Image (spheres, grey):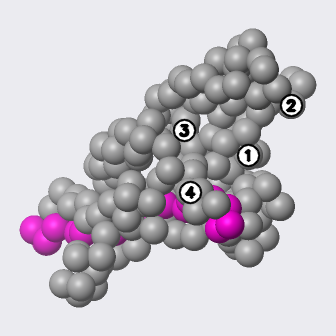
Amino acid sequence: MRAYSAGGVVFRLAPMHSPMDKLAGSQLSLEQDGAGLSSVVSMEVALVGRSHVGLWALPKGTPEPGETIEQVAVREAQEETGLLVHLVGYIGNVSYSFVRNQVRYYKQVRHFLLEAVGGDTTLHDHEYDCVEWFPIHEACRRLTYQNEVHILYLAEEMLKRWLQDQRKEGK
């Protein structure tokens, strides 16, 4: 049986103020500004977890009738993290299979880059019991599924390009 879902990498950016910030997370250097100064920001991602089994994952879920895959990604990320998100773009997909009740499922998950623009992680739904922010390299270490680690690396590269484009456009 084939199944499809969507989700993504929910990120936030924070300016880096000290050398300890650089040790703690992923630093993204941006192009020099008009004064010749380079701005550096830290990227954090929100992971959803089930503490009783030590599972950490990217938010994702199943389409409802009439939803586009982009709408699924935004809705599921918002429900599972409690955060309001803005869709930046498509990252890629992962495929895997599993067996439940003696039926083999072939699943494809399409992942999108999603910027957190509001909300609160304490408002997440009941599917997971915790939502936490992690620097991207710590998130890669924590993720339970290796195929999601690959998506995080793709997201980091995509985010670098997106930030450079934003700078060029003066945003």
Mark 2 vs mark 4: which is more N-terminal?
Answer: 4
**Amino acid type for the residue under numbered disc 4:** Trp
Is residue 53 shown in magenta? no
Secondary structure category for the residue under label 4: strand
**At 44% from the left edge and 36% from the top edge, which residue is drawn?**
147
Q: List the residue tagged with mark 3.
A: 112
**Amino acid type for the residue under numbered disc 3:** Phe
**Amino acid type for the residue under numbered disc 1:** Glu
Tell me how far mark 2 sits from mark 3, CA to CA: 18 Å
Mark 4 vs mark 3: which is more N-terminal?
Answer: 4
Tell me how far mark 2 sits from mark 4, CA to CA: 24 Å
Secondary structure category for the residue under label 1: helix
Tell me how far mark 1 sits from mark 4, CA to CA: 16 Å
Mark 3 vs mark 1: which is more N-terminal?
Answer: 1
Q: Which residues are magenta?
A: 33-52
Is residue 34 shown in magenta? yes
**Dot in front, 1 or 4:** 4
**Residue 160, percent across and down?**
30, 49
